[in-house]
């Protein structure tokens, strides 16, 4: 029966990677069986008394029993890995041998405990950082945003705004521009302590969208106006976008994303595999969570602004719902402003809580504004 | 199973002869050519979770390919992705090797591949990441390197210092500590070595003559920057 080695023996006449051998623990010591090798040397046994051995722990993880002795051919070292053999050795060996071994075993246990502790601490710290970022980042971001002057924000938005408009068909005048200007005028008139000078541009495009850039730059697409049944509906969207600017949402978003990516990069580096995926996922989750909170805030403050400007706020809710209900054309506004029942319900509840007032109509006639865009006077059947 | 290294040097190939029913596992994409009697399967070594942990934790490929001589004896030609030498080891059931993540090329069916967690200091400073591959079991194991492979043989207690990014594989009877290349922190990094591993025998350490990270940085300067 071939010998199944369970240890490696090192010595001058053996290869550097050690020669495999079979170790038996006996009452008096060890019997080492060297299997026959390729050069035709037959299997041979070597017996060692415990008194000839010095033992310690070794190997990469300090989990191997290392026995050394001086034989006829110089010093030899035995590396035992099998837990069964190590256990047998500890039981059979005399005290003076097993004591250093126990000490070594204790050291291994301590090292492992230390590893576990270090890993737990690092894991815990990571968890705290992640949770801290998740829950505490709002406060940090707000404080960071507060320190950025409006002037910087304007410059930031301005370049993006002009870059964007350079490739667009901008409407300089006409009923649509006049209508939007009137809405903005009425809305901004109700903002106290407004540090922004709002600049609004109407862009001729069938894309159903409107957006706000940091610093007070707002773009409305004619596609959105064509979908609106009344001026109040467009005003609802504008109130929402104005509040993105007033609450400095764009800036918050930039800082949050920059900060989050920076922190994650510091912690994880630029790792392959899991790390890379977690990083991507984390940044996206963060953006998503943040986006939702901002939309809700812009909705509610937008509704209040409409109310103060005496523009019928129900137009905002009906328009949002109508846009969400129809999945035709390129309603891009929805991709960044996902409409949910919860969102509409929240607005309705908010509106119901406000005292009734008589809204003041706009000076323009909405069907004419729509007609100037080439749209039929009404989209309702 | 017999194996032979063809064209030893920078662009080697490994020829493995398989008897009917035998199989080997190889790094995904390593197969260059094979006899028509060989079936190629992709297999998640160590089960789904094992494969997942290997993929995510070591950055190694999720699937290994299994080349099985199911329809008669045949041969397989294997080659690594990067230019560099290949070394074939024979695991005897007792010898075990730790292998850095890009070092595995192929192994016989008796070779067991595990991902193993390193200690915090080795993981952070060793340049190998927190998880490396541990090869145990019995049979042929082919490792590949970037550049030439050099074998360092260490006697019990003998020490040797290796720049961590040149490591390919090392036997588990060795121990190593991570240390700064020079006594001062600044000098350590300005010397270009950063951290080094101080290995202590007995055992064998395989190193590669080129540093993949440095090579990548060198190539990067020639890549045109896109707009």
Image (cartoon, rainbow, N blue to C red):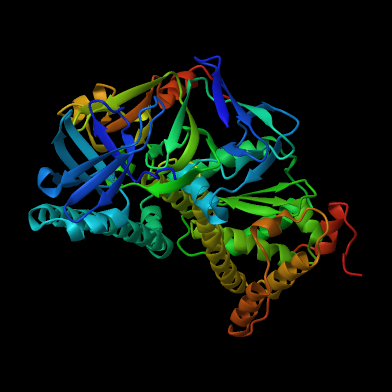
Name the image quarter holding the C terminus of chain B: top right
User: Which quarter of the picture shows residue A353?
Assistant: bottom right
**Quarter-wise, where is residue B28 in the image?**
top right
Residue A323 position (above or below residue B184): below
Q: Quadrant of residue B197?
A: top left
Residue at 71%, 40% (x, y): give it.
B70
Q: Residue B110: x percent and y percent?
A: 52, 43
Q: Is residue A73 left or right of residue A268?
A: left
Question: In this rendering, does residue A214 appear at all?
Answer: no
Along the viewing direction, whichever of A279 and A70 lies nearer the viewer: A70
Rendered position, A155 above or below A184? above
Horizontal placement of A96 versus A252: left or right?
left
Residue at x-position 49% and y-position 14%: B9
Residue drawn at (49%, 51%) of the image: B53
The tally of labels here is 0
In the image, residue A375 above or below residue B137: below
Q: Residue A380 or A129: which is nearer the viewer? A: A129
Q: Please give left or right for residue B143 compared with residue A69 in the image.
A: right
Q: Nearer the viewer, residue A165 or B1?
A: B1
Outermost residue, left side: A96
Q: In this view of the protein, can residue A211 be seen by the observer?
A: yes
Q: Quadrant of the N terminus of chain B?
A: top right
Report whether A252 appears left or right of A79: right
Residue A341 screen position, x and y as percent:
68, 74
The image position of residue A209, as x and y in percent, is 71, 54
Compared with A71, B222 (above or below) is: above
Residue A4: x %, y % from top left = 40, 45
- Front position in the image: A72 or B107: A72
């Amino acid at each position: 029966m071939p010998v199944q080695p369970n240890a490696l023996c090192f010595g001058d006449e053996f290869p550097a990677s050690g020669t495999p051998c079979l170790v038996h623990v006996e009452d008096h010591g060890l019997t080492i069986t060297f299997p026959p090798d390729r050069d035709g040397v037959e299997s041979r046994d070597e017996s060692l008394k415990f008194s000839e051995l010095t033992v310690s722990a070794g190997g990469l993880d300090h989990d191997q029993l290392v026995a050394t002795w001086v034989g006829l051919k110089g010093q030899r070292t035995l590396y035992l890995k099998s837990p069964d053999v190590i256990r047998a050795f500890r039981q059979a060996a005399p005290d003076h041998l097993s004591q250093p071994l126990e000490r070594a075993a204790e050291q291994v246990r301590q090292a492992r405990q230390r590893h576990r502790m270090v890993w737990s601490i690092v894991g815990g710290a990571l968890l705290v950082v992640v949770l801290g970022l998740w829950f505490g980042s709002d406060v940090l971001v707000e404080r960071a945003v507060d320190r950025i002057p409006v002037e910087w924000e304007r410059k930031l938005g301005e370049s993006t705004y002009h870059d964007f408009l350079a490739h667009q068909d901008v409407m300089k005048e006409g009923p649509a521009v006049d209508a939007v200007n009137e809405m903005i005028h009425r809305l901004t008139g109700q903002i106290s302590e407004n540090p922004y000078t709002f600049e609004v541009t109407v862009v001729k495009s069938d894309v159903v969208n409107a957006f706000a850039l940091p610093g007070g730059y707002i773009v409305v697409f004619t596609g959105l106006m064509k979908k609106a049944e009344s001026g109040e509906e467009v005003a609802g969207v504008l109130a929402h976008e104005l509040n993105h600017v007033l609450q400095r949402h764009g800036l918050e978003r930039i800082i949050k994303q920059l900060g989050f990516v920076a922190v994650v990069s510091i912690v994880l580096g630029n790792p392959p595999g899991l790390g890379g995926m977690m990083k991507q996922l984390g940044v996206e989750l963060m953006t998503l969570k943040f986006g939702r909170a901002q939309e809700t805030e812009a909705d509610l403050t937008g509704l209040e602004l409409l109310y103060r400007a005496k523009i019928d706020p129900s137009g905002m809710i009906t328009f949002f719902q109508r846009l969400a209900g129809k999945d035709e054309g390129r309603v891009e506004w929805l991709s960044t402003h996902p409409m949910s029942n919860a969102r509409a319900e929240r607005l309705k509840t908010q509106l119901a809580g406000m005292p009734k007032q008589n809204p003041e109509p706009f000076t323009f006639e909405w069907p004419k504004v729509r007609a100037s865009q080439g749209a039929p006077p009404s989209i309702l059947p | 199973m017999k194996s032979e290294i063809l064209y030893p040097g920078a662009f080697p190939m490994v020829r493995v002869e398989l008897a009917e029913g035998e199989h080997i596992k190889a790094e995904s994409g390593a197969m260059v050519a094979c006899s028509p009697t060989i079936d190629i399967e992709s297999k998640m070594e160590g089960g789904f979770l094992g494969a997942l942990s290997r993929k995510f934790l070591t950055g190694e490929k999720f699937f290994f390919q299994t080349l099985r001589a199911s329809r008669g004896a045949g041969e397989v030609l294997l080659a690594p992705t990067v230019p560099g030498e290949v070394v074939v080891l024979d695991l005897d059931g007792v010898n075990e090797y730790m292998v850095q993540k890009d070092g595995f090329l192929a192994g016989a069916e008796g070779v067991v591949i595990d991902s193993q967690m390193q200690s915090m200091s080795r993981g952070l400073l060793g340049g190998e990441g927190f998880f490396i591959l541990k090869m145990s079991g019995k049979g042929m194991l082919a490792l590949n390197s970037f550049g030439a492979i050099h074998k360092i043989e260490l006697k019990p207690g003998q020490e040797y210092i290796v720049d961590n990014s040149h490591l390919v594989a090392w036997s588990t009877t060795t121990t190593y500590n991570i240390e700064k290349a020079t006594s001062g922190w600044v000098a350590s990094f300005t010397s270009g070595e950063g951290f080094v591993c101080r290995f202590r025998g007995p055992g064998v350490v395989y190193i590669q003559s080129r540093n993949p990270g440095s090579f990548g940085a060198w190539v990067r300067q020639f890549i045109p920057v896109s707009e």
